[in-house]
Image (cartoon, grey):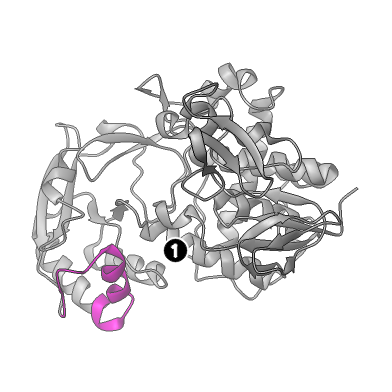
Amino acid sequence: MSPESATVVGRGPAGLMAATLLAAGGVSVHLVAAAAGSLALWSGRMDFRGWDGGEPVANPWEWWGQHGAEHMDGGDSLGRWSRVWALWGALARELGVGAAVPAANRWAPTPLGHRRPVFWAPPWELALEGGPASLSSAAVVGFTGFPDFDAELAADGFPASVAVDTAWLPKPPGWSPSWTALRYAAYFDTEPGADWLAQQLLGAVGPLAPELVVVPQVLGLEHTGALWRRLERLLERPVREVGLTPPGVGGMRIERRWMRWLLASGVHLHHGRVQSLYDAGGVWLGDGRRAGTGPVILATGGFLGGGLHLGPNGRAEDPVLRRTVGHLGETDSADTILRWGLAMGDPPACGRQVAGCDPDADGDGGAMCLWTAASAVDRVAPELVDRLQRIGQEPISIISHFGDNGGREEALHG
């Protein structure tokens, strides 16, 4: 039986997904966080399984079909994965960043001139189908005075079979050495900034006539869709971004849309650092306030997210549960402690750090957030997840409970 209300602690992708699933099932959700979550560190990609022992994985569906029983909940992992990804695809459409969930990994160059597997990506981000042979030419565009993206270095990420030109745009009006990717994106959100970029790109790329135009991830924060479509119409070819080092402009775009959507859908947001759990439901904050009601899901992250503290003598502690989860250099390795999420017991925890998986080495951090969020919700409201997972077989919307939420952003497609 579903609770009438529940409390989610943490605003990263796992916490937001848990809050979304609960709210979609009609549960009154209280979302508690001291600060914005880790989406601001992401480009917006959601990886499934990118690497296996350092080698790229071509088809993560096949990989999980072979290895799923060794990880997490076991059982029919491939069937569960299909339903989890279908839920994500439905949510992405609601947020206006819809892109089809692919049947296999794609590939993309990185800012450092490498190539990496890419699974789901928002429509603005570069993810190439069919391997290197599917592309014949590209133009990689950088900005003079912007050290976060070297067009010539990024061009090295394309195989030799692709003819790659590089182009450099001048410094925008008002530029200073302090401009970061976020400052560029804010400028291109303005009408003068969008006009300047369109004019400069047309002059630099138009004569090259590439099959694809690649730019750093700076095409605005709030008006990305309008700018992106304008540039594609002007240049008469696809324009795609390459994600940069944090902070991630693409992740910020999704986080802003997602938070507005959750608030418009009735989710209650509480600002504050959680001190402890409240026996009757919800949590106590550090300033003495009580926040939320009902069962609690922890999505507080590891050391970087503040979900774990490193105490004396290498002791790793969960500050909310006041529980020691390991000892660095003694009984546990750093890898064991960093992958602590699934084994935390009660209350359930979710996030990219899951026992048995290493998201940085395996390229599956996004998938871990989705899977563990669904598993955590399954713990507090089992029949709710079962009902929502019908979306894997039926053309229904997980937002059918909400109707027109009024907070939907401009669609990036069409």
Is 313 inside the magenta-drawn segment? no
User: Do we see residue 413 in this rendering?
Assistant: no
Would you identify the image quadrant in which residue 337 lies?
top right
Residue at 86% from the left image edge and 59% from the top image edge: 4
Of 237 and 320, the residue lying toward us? 320
What residue is rendered at 79% in x and 56% in y? 278
Q: Kindly identify the residue that appears in the image at 80 percent across and 52 percent down.
A: 295
Image quadrant in which you'd find residue 362: top left
What residue span does the magenta drawing correspond to?
174-194
Across and down, in percent, residue 238 comes to 29, 55
Q: Is residue 342 visible?
A: yes
In the rendered image, which quarter is residue 161 located in?
Answer: top left
| Side of 54 relative to 59 (left or right) | left
- In the displayed structure, would residue 241 be above or below residue 181? above
Q: Is residue 191 magenta?
A: yes
Quarter of the picture holding the C terminus = bottom left
Residue 231 sits above or below residue 142 on the image? below
Quick check: 25 left or right of 18? right
Q: Amino acid at mark 1?
A: Arg
Residue at the location (10% across, 63% down)?
144
Q: Which residue is at the far right?
A: 1
413 and 312: which one is in front? Answer: 312
Rendered view: 400 above or below 349: below
Label 1 SS: helix
Question: Where is residue 125 shown, x and y percent of the image?
Answer: 36, 52
- Which percent across, then down, holds residue 369? 57, 43
Task: Name the foreground residue: 106 vs 206.
Answer: 106
Return the residue at label 1.
253
Point out residue 1 in the picture as x, y percentages from the top left corner. 91, 47
